[in-house]
Image: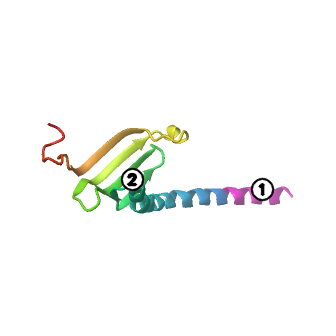
Amino acid sequence: MASAARRWLIGGLVGLVFLVFVLMMLTPVVARWYINSEVPQLIGIDVSVDNVDVHWFDTAVTVEKLRIARRGEAALLEGASVEIDIDVLELLNNRVIVEYIELDGTDIDITRADGSHNLA
């Protein structure tokens, strides 16, 4: 009887580890789909990414080839790589707190409608 319970326990643990592994592998795929298809509809701005990498232990997300543009206009932001670190505990309160953003190989359009720069 004890060996049957032990087998069920080991089988359950193996199943749980497998489920966690599958969820970790699917998260970037689901995030990429959400960013490319749902976010533009929510905010009214074209957003696209090629790859999403979730860093599970330092609560950061790296997005490769991020492009943000107003519909039918030139890109506001195009980045080879954008890393965003968020406060995970605040997600439990339905708040997104960005602790830092690292932009690598990024072009940002900083001109106003009249042609002047936003930094001036």
| Residue 46 pos. (x, y %) | 33, 59
Residues packed near mark 2 inside 10 Å, few (<14), some (14 to 19) or many (20 plus): few
Of labels 2 and 1, earlier in sequence is 1
Say which amino acid is labelled 2.
Ile
Q: Quadrant of the C terminus?
A: top left
* Mark 1 nearby-residue class (10 Å; few <14, some 14–19, many ≥20): few
Whole-percent x and y of residue 87?
Answer: 46, 39
Q: Hey, which quadrant is residue 100 in on the image?
A: top left
Q: Is residue 103 left or right of residue 11?
A: left
Nearer the observer: mark 2 or 1; the answer is: 2
Q: In the rendered image, which residue does mark 1 sit on?
A: 6
Q: Is residue 36 above or below residue 99?
A: below
Q: Which residues are magenta?
A: 1-13
Q: CA distance from mark 2 to mark 1?
A: 51 Å
Q: Which residue is mark 2?
A: 43
Q: Answer yes or no: do the residues labelled 2 and 1 have beta carbons within 8 Å?
A: no
Indicate whether residue 25 is drawn in magenta: no
